[in-house]
Image (tube, rainbow, N blue to C red):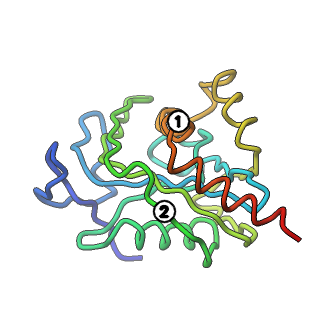
Amino acid sequence: MAEEFVVLVNKRNKPIGRALKSEVHYSNTPLHRGFSVFLFNQKGDLLLQQRSRFKKTWPLAWSNSCCGHPAPGEKTISAAKRRLTFELGFKKVKLFVILPNYRYRFERDGVVENEMCPVLVGFTKELASPNPQEVEAIEWRGWQDFLQDIKDNPGKYSEWCIEEAQFLSQNHKFQQLYKKYTALSKVK
């Protein structure tokens, strides 16, 4: 597989360079572009992913459906669709950018994640087919049940997943999309 690059950015999200993905995450990780996806099925359940034991960042932590990095010149939605296919086998997903300017910096076990990270929400009718090199386990969980679990068991989840979920739960655009796409499943 070809080496993957991430886009290094300044605080205004302007590209200032690129770096090998395999070399960018360490104790002083430079700010770079990423993305996070929260994927829902027709019932309104969220797909949670336990990150693979082989991941350099947050191995075995539970997190949102999919995370990744756009390659230089790649649009965020294109990158998200690429990773959803690679990690989870999804080919038909409707994606919407909900939090375009989300930024975070978290540290765990001496490794820092430092990203300009748009948060996307997606909806699918497909079944997951996880890539074992990327995903340790998956679980579909009701949205409200998940929100309660991140309050009760925060150490189980990646910090960005918790913070992004909290922002989504208060976001009007997300609430409208969630109602629209889950209501369609109730129509017979």
At x 53% / y 33%, what residue is drawn? 166
Residue 84 higher or lower than 117, as above or below: below
Q: Position of residue 22 (x, y in %)?
A: 34, 56
Q: Which residue is mark 1?
A: 170
Rendering coords of residue 157 (x, y %): 59, 34
The image position of residue 152, as x and y in percent, is 69, 21
Depth check, front residue: 164 or 59: 164
Q: Secondary structure at mark 1?
A: loop
| Residue nearest the viewer, comparing 166 with 184 | 184
Q: Determine which of the numbered discs, if any, sits on residue 184 in the image.
A: none
Q: Three-letter amino acid code at disc 2?
A: Phe
Q: Residue at x 62, y 41 (%)?
A: 62
Task: Assign the C terminus to one quadrant of the image.
Answer: bottom right
User: Three-letter amino acid code at disc 1?
Assistant: Gln
> Is 36 positioned to the left or the right of 85 in the image?
left
Return the disc, 2 or 1, that comes first in the chain's sequence: 2
3D distance between C-alphas at marks 2 and 1: 16 Å
Q: Farthest residue in the right direction? A: 188
Residue at position x 63%, y 30% in the image: 156
Q: Which residue is mark 2?
A: 96
Labels 2 & 1 near each other (Cβ < 8 A)? no
Closer-to-camera residue (28/173): 173
